[in-house]
Image (cartoon, rainbow, N blue to C red):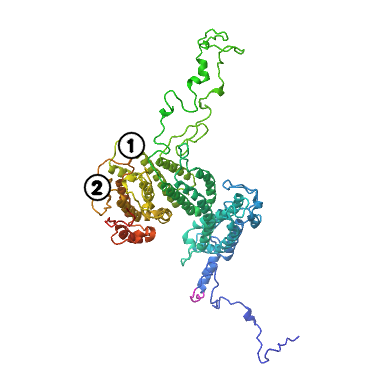
Amino acid sequence: MTIRAPAFLSKSRPSSPGPTRADRSPPSEADGTLPTRRPLSRLQNPFKRSTSASPAPLTHTQLAAFNAALDTASPLPGVGAQYLDSLGLKFAEAASNALANPVGPVTPNANTPGSAATASNDPCAQLLKGRRPFPPGRGAALGALITTELSRSADVHLSRAIVRTLQRPLSVLLNNISGLLMPILPYVTTPATSQLSAPATASSLAQSHALGIARLAAELLEALKGINTSVIVGAGGVDYLRGTRDGLEVLVQRVVNPLLSNIKIELGPVLDKLSAAPELEADGQAPSALPALTAALPGITMRLDWYTSPGVPAHSAHAALLISLVWRALVALSSRPLADPFTFMGMKKPRSREGMNQGGKDKTSPGLKAKKDLPFVSALSRPATINGASTPNGAATPNGIATAPPAVASGPTPPATPRFGRIGLPLTSISRPPSPTSSSGVVSKSKGAPASLPVTPLQRLLADTSAVQAMLGTLSKPPCGCLAFEAVDEAFDALAGFKTMLKWLVDEAVAQNEGPAKSLQDIVEQLLEAAEDVPCLIALNVLVQLVSPEQLSRRMPGGDARDESTAWRAIAVPELLNMEVEEYRTSCLAGFSRADAAVDPVGHAVLDALETHKRPLMVRSVSSSSTVTFSPAASLRELPGTPGLLSSQKGLDLRVLRAWLMERIATNDDDNKDTPIAPSLPASTFAPSVASASSTTGLGVKLAPSISSGSSMSTASSSGGSGFKSA
């Protein structure tokens, strides 16, 4: 049979010659003909592009040495394609097992609020399609496998080849867990009453799966961070696992941050209620502002432990939450108005033990019977039942006390044991323990309980601060030894320092009333020591309110005249700065760093306001010249040795406040001299009259440039005023 050429081919085209025997034989090594380019091995990076020329062919000597090396037994694992392919399959299988649906009985998590019994009513149940949350330890198991395989290879090039083989399974794993998380992520932070009929259970179902995914990613992330840097970084400085680590960290933050933000949103308004001054009730007692916080903390504590279960990747968000809660509590407590801070609430002085009888010597308190009217007193006063005297209806006993006969007595002799219902004394039961005192030192009210001793507003503030410190201390903190724990510890130290300062103020007020007077210099030194750990602006909120009205002018910033008939009206820092309270909190009290950066401009503005509105006849200025000197040593040395005025009659001496504030401003300038400070405050932070003051106004000229640049400044008092409204 003859094969003919197709018609479309030219007949003049010659046919290809048939293969010969010599062409079928492979090239031999004896001719010296070798391929011009070697194929890439698995040890080389297939993704690296290079413009270099093709490598030169191997010589006979090099080829013989390479073949001998392949035949020699090596203690290392095989470096061929089969070994790396098997590792890739092993990693892919381990990643698939990490995402497999858990099997076996359901083990309830003690930290999980709610129950899965009502999961059928949850919209997330349809999205999950019967999947269960990932149990702890799956990410750690995958990370242990990766670490083990890398530790077996002693060669750096082999380790880098294993890491390159690991890139594909980890990328697939990251995409899969992101796909599992995205559908349920909107339900994690859904408000309770928006879509779900059972809020707690519904939220728990979505959060359980989201936290299970975040826990898996966090465990794998910790394992990848533990790998030696020389292994995962290539020759060109390329980190092969950086993209995977960043993706896992972002995934954990997308789950943990919204959950912790919900706690901040729920607990923040409760802490803000601490800034309200308690109102007196009819019995003269001031109710505590802590019941709402006490009721909210147990659930918050359990949820916080659950939300921070991913571990180290959640430490930063955990620390940020605790620091924000502590700061919010400090701002609320320090901003509480202290009207008559040294006067007992509800009455002029504490109730003494000798004042129980009201109305005279022979009168008892209302509701109590006189001793002579008690039935058992009347019974014992009859001589017929004492010392075994002969009675017609009683018989003497050996101990000399007559007993009643079994029959009903017909005479006037009453029964020996009176009925309990007729006793009117408020006797306390032996089996019942006394009512516990509340955190504020006030006995909890119960039926028939006596009224508690009154306290001053400053003492109530101290008691509430102690209670808030104890309750916030129950919240879980990051593990000891990490940077997050140190940051949280510093925040709680500030809260403890605020409590120490309040305790010193209360004790000093009592000591000034009862003991010998102290000099102003001693009071300033003790105040500096007591408020050492307190942020300056937090302490300033309280100390300014302790200045008595007699030391300041009748008209203060804000436009309202001080009423001379009132005993005391608290002075606030925003009032001195001619600012709104919310504006002052937003611009100057947004956080620890913001408050530290605002110490210099706010402190100088307060000093100028106090200098402008003080009464020169009542309080002598610290410096006789018009320029205020901010040297700490000079401010303490120039204080006269007159007795201190921290008492219920005079309040905090204005000179003590000025000297303390100068010292804190100087200390803050020294601390921030070589360290970068927070973003500077804008010139519009304070009142417009301050920012746009004329050249004759010392505060306006000096303060505005300093606020814009964030540097320290010197304040000069001039006759032109300070930019504030004055009489």
The amino acid type found where label 1 is placed reads Asn
The residue that appears at 62% across and 78% down in the rendered structure is 25
Spot occupied by residue 585 in the image (x, y as percentages of width and height):
42, 54
Which residue is nearer to you in this view: 321 or 26?
A: 321
| Mark 1 secondary-structure assignment | helix
Residue that numbered label 2 is attached to: 638
Task: Name the residue beneath numbered marker 1.
Answer: 513
The quarter of the rendered structure image containing the N terminus is bottom right
Instruction: Where is residue 486? Give x, y as percent.
Output: 43, 50
Looking at the image, is mark 2 or mark 1 nearer the viewer? Answer: 1
* The one of 432 and 593 positioned closer to us in this rendering: 432
Corner quadrant of residue 457: top left
Residue lying at the far right of the rendered structure: 1
Using a 10 Å C-alpha cutoff, classify the residue at mark 2 as few (fewer than 14 neighbours), some (14 to 19) or many (20 or more).
few
Front residue of this view, candidates 122 and 161: 122
What segment is highlighted magenta in the picture?
50-57
